[in-house]
Image: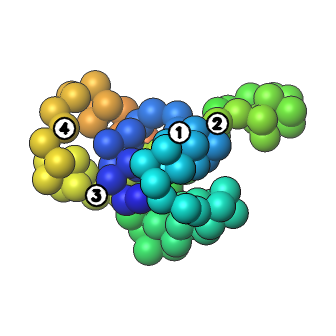
Amino acid sequence: MIKSPIRNFARELSVRKLHNYLQSAGVSLSKTEVYEYFSYLEDINVIFLLKKYGKGVRGVEGSIPKIYLIDLGCVTLHELEDIRRRIENVVAIELLPDFR
C-alpha cells in the first residue's frame, strides 16, 4: 500500500484505480480503507495530496489529487530516477508554507 504512492509521486492517483489494482492483486480492502490509509500517510507526513487549482468549485473538487512526498529519500530507496517529477515535488514542497 505504501509503495504505490511512492512510485506514483508527482502524479495523479485515483483511489478507485488503486482499489481496483489492489483487488486484482488479491488484497481485500474497501475504498474507505484505502482513503483511511492515505489519511494516515498524510497524518504522519509521508505524503500530501494537492488538488488542481481552479476558479470553479466543481472543477477543483472533482479533480484527482496529485501525490507529493515530504521526503524524497523514499524515491531514492525505490530507485526511481525521474528528474522532472523530483523537481516538481521539490517545487510543490517549497510553495506550501506548512512544510518549510
| Residue of label 3 | 71
| Residue of label 2 | 64
Tell me the amino acid under the disc marked 1.
Answer: Leu
Comes first in the chain, label 3 or label 4: 3
| Residue of label 1 | 13
- Judging depth in this view, the residue of 3 and 11 nearest the camera is 3
Q: Are marks 1 and 4 in contact (CB under 8 Å)?
A: no
In which quadrant is the C terminus drawn?
A: bottom left
Q: Residues within 10 Å of mark 4 (few under 14, many from 20)?
A: some
Secondary structure category for the residue under label 3? loop
Question: Residue 69: horizontal and vertical position, in percent?
Answer: 37, 52
Q: Are marks 1 and 2 in contact (CB under 8 Å)?
A: yes
Residue mark closest to the camera, 3 vs 2: 2
**C-alpha separation, residue under disc 3 versus residue under disc 4:** 13 Å
**C-alpha separation, residue under disc 1 versus residue under disc 2:** 7 Å
| Residue of label 4 | 80
Question: Residue 20: horizontal and vertical position, in percent?
Answer: 57, 43
Comes first in the chain, label 1 or label 4: 1
Comes first in the chain, label 3 or label 2: 2
Residue at horizontal 78 percent and vertical 40 percent from the top:
61
Residue at horizontal 13 percent and vertical 42 percent from the top:
79
Rendered position, 12 above or below 28:
above
Please give left or right for residue 32 compared with residue 14 in the image. Answer: right
Tell me the amino acid under the disc marked 3.
Answer: Asp
**C-alpha separation, residue under disc 1 versus residue under disc 4:** 17 Å
Comes first in the chain, label 2 or label 4: 2
